Image (cartoon, rainbow, N blue to C red):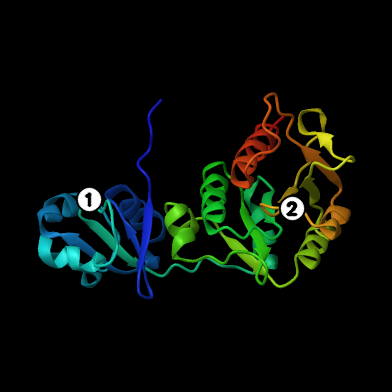
Amino acid sequence: MGVRKDRKVVSASEKAWLVGKKPVFDLLKNKSDRIIKLYLLDTEKNQFFDRDVDIDRSKVQFLNKVDFLKLFEGIENVNHQGFCANINPSNSVSIEQLIRRSKNSGRGIIIGLDQVKDPHNLGSIFRTAEALGADGLFFGSSQSAPVTSTVRRISVGATEFLPYSEVTNTANAITKLKKEGYWIYGTSLSDESLDLEKTDILFPLVIMFGSEASGLRRLTEDLCDRLVHINQYGTTESLNVATAVSAVLYYARSKLNQ
C-alpha cells in the first residue's frame, strides 16, 4: 500500500506556514485563496511553472537557499522540499454553518469533542476526521485545546481543509444538532454503553468523544441518544482519544451506504 506524503504546517511568530511540495500544490488546487504569499526555492521555478496553477503571480516569490531557510529560523526539522506557503489558517465556522455544510455533503457525519485538551490529540483528530470523510468537528472554546500552530502541525494540514466550530457551550451545540435531526452517539465505558459493532448506526450522526483523563462529562452523556464503546480484544483498558476517533469513525463511515 502506498503512503501519501504528509502535509506539514509550522509556525514562526504569528505566521502560519504550509510546507512541502504536495501539500502546497493541494492547497493551490483546492483553496488557493487561502495563500497570502508563496515562497519557493529558485531551483523549483521550472517545476512550478510546468504545473497549471491558479494564483496571482504577484504572490509568488523565488528565493535562493540562504534566504529561503531564513523563513524557518528557530524551527527545527522542517521538510520543506523547496515549497512554503504563508497562509490564512482560519477555517472556523459557526455551528449553524457546520450543520448546513454537513447536510449538503451527502454524508452527515460530525465529530464532537468534549474537553479534549491535548493539542497533539486535537491535531491527530483533525487529520483522521479529514482523511476519513467527516463533514467537520466542533468543540468547546473555553475548556478544550484551541487550534494553534501545534495543532496545525500535528494535523499535517488537515485544519486547512476540514471545517470546525469552536462553540461556547457544548450542550447547546448538541441540542441544536438534535433539533436538526442528528443522532448523537457518545463514546463511553459506562455500564449503559453498548458494543459499537452490535449497535445500529443511524444517519445523520454526531460522534462525541471525551477528555483524555475522564471521558465524556455526565451532562454530555445524558444528551446522547446512545452510548457506545469499542469492543477490545487485547488487555489494554482503553484507547487514546485520537485512536478511538479513528476506529469509531472508520466503522461508522463503513455503514453510510448500507
In the foreground, 197 or 189: 189
Image quarter in which the N terminus is found: top left
Left or right: where 120 falls relative to 97:
left
Q: Is residue 44 above or below residue 141?
A: above
Q: Position of residue 93 (x, y in %)?
A: 60, 68
Q: Quadrant of residue 194?
A: top right
Q: Earlier in the sequence, mark 1 or mark 2?
A: 1
In the foreground, 106 or 154: 154
Crowding near the residue tagged with mark 2, few <14, some 14–19, many ≥20 C-alpha atoms within 10 Å:
few
* Amino acid type, callout 2: Ser
SS at circle 1: loop
Left or right: where 175 falls relative to 112:
right
Which residue is the site of mark 2? 214
Number of numbered callouts drawn: 2
* Amino acid type, callout 1: Gln
User: Where residue 81 is drawn, which disc sits there?
Assistant: 1
Q: Position of residue 45 (x, y in %)?
A: 13, 56
In the foreground, 178 or 72: 72
Q: Is residue 88 above or below residue 180?
A: below
Q: Quadrant of residue 143?
A: bottom right
Q: Position of residue 224 (x, y in %)?
A: 84, 51
User: Where residue 153 is drawn, which disc sits there?
Assistant: none
SS at circle 2: loop
Distance from the alpha carbon under mark 1 to that under mark 2: 41 Å
Closer to the eye: label 1 or 2:
2
State the residue at coordinates (81%, 48%).
183
Q: Is label 1 in contact with label 2 (beta carbons under 8 Å)? A: no
State the residue at coordinates (52%, 54%).
120
